[in-house]
Amino acid sequence: MTESGTAADLPRGFFARDAETVARDLLGCLLVRRTAAGEILCRVVETEAYVGAHDLACHASKGRTPRTDPMFGPAGRAYVYFVYGMHHMLNVVTGPEGDPQAVLIRGASSWPPGAGRETAMAGPAKLCKALGIETSLHNRMDLCTGSELAFRPRPTPLAESVLATPRIGVDYAGEWAAKPLRFLLEGASGVSGRRIPTSARQKG
């Protein structure tokens, strides 16, 4: 690792894949928030994939607008949006440039374990509040160049099973509401919701 601390950050190529693959592969990885006081690390335990303009739950299904423009690339940038007049949500742009895909970071746990932030990061809005992530500061930020936000590879192999479930809060999206595009680590602290129907389990 270099003195800047960026050598271990996930490279752009990791994100330049389809959102569903990236959403699965981000589980167990570390989200890094760099501050003047040092780094805050947390382990990603829950994600949701938004797979393109044809996905009716995806913001980009309504077209390219000033709000959704970051989703069109390049991969490896943050898409942070503001909802309900009070909450920020952190997404990572994925896929080829021009194809609006992203992964929502829904939940995380403390790393190393025991820092006590699990409850504070169980949900995308709570996670952003706990880490001080805001639309005005972090939207469009490049996550692959040593900025305030980054991701690092899994520090340890996954011990938990991966569950795939429908996404939360997208009932308006017709058949897309039922797609199993929410991924979580079974039994992990920091998961935002426990609505788990019959699901595919994968290890590792």
Image (cartoon, rainbow, N blue to C red):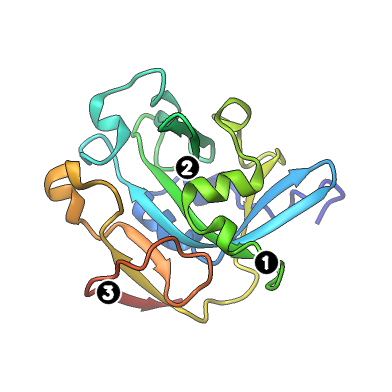
Which quarter of the rendering shows the N terminus?
bottom right
Residue wearing tag 3: 200
- Which residue is pictured at 28% across the width and 64% down the height? 165
Residue sitting farthest toward the top = 66
- Which residue is pictured at 47% across the width and 79% down the height? 160
- Which residue is pictured at 31% across the width and 33% down the height? 59
Contact, mark 1 vs mark 3 (Cβ under 8 Å): no
Contact, mark 2 vs mark 1 (Cβ under 8 Å): no
Sequence order check, earlier mark of 3 and 2? 2
In terms of image quadrants, where is residue 40? bottom right
User: Which label was assigned to residue 116?
Assistant: 1
Which x, y percent locates residue 8?
70, 56
Secondary structure beneath disc 2? strand
Marks 1 and 3: which is nearer the front? 1
**Toward the viewer: 29 or 115?**
115
Q: Amino acid at mark 2?
A: Asn
Which x, y percent locates residue 188?
50, 73
Which x, y percent locates residue 132?
65, 41
**Left or right, residue 18 beside residue 122:** left
Residue wearing tag 2: 91
Which x, y percent locates residue 7?
74, 52
- Which residue is pictured at 85% across the width and 46% down the height? 37
Secondary structure beneath disc 3? strand
